[in-house]
Image: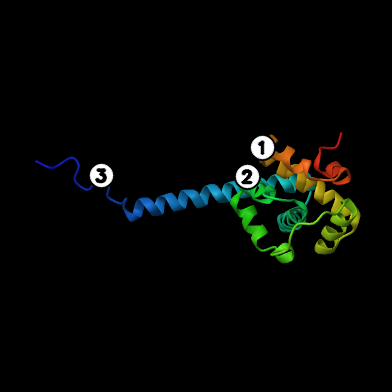
Amino acid sequence: MANENEGRPEAGERPSTSTEELRAKRRESRTSRTYTLFLRDLEAKAGVDRPLAERAAESVLCTLEQRLMGQEVEHLEAQLPQKVRDLLQRCPRHEGLPPRKFKMLEFLQMVSDDLDTTPNEAERLTRAVFATVRAHISEGEAEDVIGQLPADLRALWVPEA
């Protein structure tokens, strides 16, 4: 008579490699889906193609991270899709540098220079990235971010009336 439990791991045994591989594939699939949803949302809000959406997200979020103080960068990143966080890992502009305070004009100039576009286009893309980020994070985190921004930058973070 065959044992029903044959082939099943005993209590305390490590799951089979195939189970671990399946979990890894599921995690990668979920990671890709959340990233794709984020980018589709940004593409729709900004009216741009995928490559520009990725570049705009990286530029705007990297610039925002240069402005946020304390643990706020980690808190914001924790709520972003993993692949968006991966984009930010490639952003060398603020690596090892302390955050610093700057206002909207400097923020937009940094994005404009990075994307090689006009300040008006940088503002439009920044608004779209901010709107997309707000849609993908908690309301509490959005309030924490806005609490660190000067009034002129807050105007970009809040939805236009």
Give the position of the N terminus as an image quadrant. top left
Question: Which residue lies most toward the left here?
Answer: 1
- Marks 3 and 1, the one that precedes in the sequence: 3
* Label 1 Cα crowd, 10 Å radius (few <14 / some 14-19 / many 20+): few
Q: Is residue 152 left or right of residue 37?
A: right
- Marks 3 and 2, the one that precedes in the sequence: 3
Which x, y percent locates residue 53?
Answer: 73, 54
Res. 150 image quadrant: top right
Of residues 98 and 35, the one nearer the viewer is: 98
Res. 119 image quadrant: bottom right
For numbered disc 1, what is the local secondary structure?
A: loop
Give the position of the C terminus as an image quadrant. top right
- Tag 1: residue type? Ser
* Label 3 Cα crowd, 10 Å radius (few <14 / some 14-19 / many 20+): few
Q: Are marks 1 and 2 in contact (CB under 8 Å)?
A: yes
Of residues 94 and 99, the one nearer the viewer is: 99
- Marks 1 and 2, the one that precedes in the sequence: 2
Disc 1/disc 2 C-alpha distance (Å): 8 Å
Taking the spot 46% from the left edge, 52% from the top edge, the residue there is 25
For numbered disc 3, what is the local secondary structure?
A: loop
* Label 2 Cα crowd, 10 Å radius (few <14 / some 14-19 / many 20+): some
Label ID, residue 74: none
Q: Is residue 11 left or right of residue 121?
A: left
Label ID, residue 138: 1
- Tag 3: residue type? Ala
Which x, y percent locates residue 133?
Answer: 71, 44
Label ID, residue 11: 3
Label ID, residue 79: 2
